[in-house]
Amino acid sequence: MRYLLLTFYRKPGGQIDEERKVAASIKPRDLQQCNVIMDYKEEKVIKCVIEGKMVPTSFEKLNEYYKKIYPEAIDQLELINHERFEPKSIL
């Protein structure tokens, strides 16, 4: 898995729900519907739209924020995407 995908839904009472997905690839539908798309392989924010407005932010800030909310998912994304690039010790 490479991407964290978040979509926000506003309920009739005004409450906002958040749907989280982890995916290996991004589909065109994800680019249209998701509010936040983070690439853990490249460590970059592909999309961050909150209440219809593009929000400029860094990967580090978003990662820190969502790590508090979804610690297991973020830890897994970091582990999977970073271990591929770190050389394995043969000692």
Image (spheres, grey):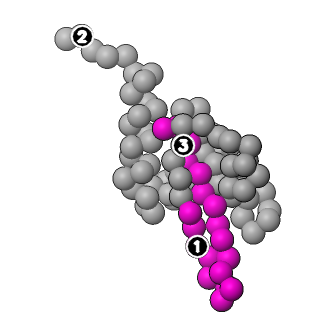
- Find residue 90 and name its label: 2
User: Which image quarter is the C terminus in?
Assistant: top left
Residue at the image point whose x is 41% and y is 34% from the top: 80
Distance of mark 2 from mark 1, alpha carbons? 47 Å
Majority secondary structure in the magenta region? strand
Q: Amino acid at mark 3?
A: Ala
> Of helix, strand and loop, which one carries label 1?
strand
Q: Nearer the viewer, mark 2 or mark 1?
A: 1
Dot 2 alpha-carbon crowd within 10 angstroms: few under 14, some 14 to 19, many 20 or more = few
- Identify the mark nearer the N-term, 3 or 1: 1
Q: Amino acid at mark 1?
A: Asp
Residue 74, compared with residue 50, is above or below; it is above
Contact check, label 2 and label 1, Cβ < 8 Å? no
Q: Is residue 78 one of those drawn in magenta?
A: no
Q: Amino acid at mark 2?
A: Ile
Dot 3 alpha-carbon crowd within 10 angstroms: few under 14, some 14 to 19, many 20 or more = some
Residue at the image point whose x is 78% and y is 57% from the top: 54
First to last magenta residue range: 1-19
- Identify the mark nearer the N-term, 2 or 1: 1
- In the image, taking residue 40 as reference, residue 82 lies left or right, namely left
Residue 52, compared with residue 33, is above or below; it is below
Q: Position of residue 41 (x, y in %)?
A: 54, 32
The residue labelled by disc 3 is: 23
Residue at the image point whose x is 64% and y is 48% from the top: 37
The residue labelled by disc 1 is: 17
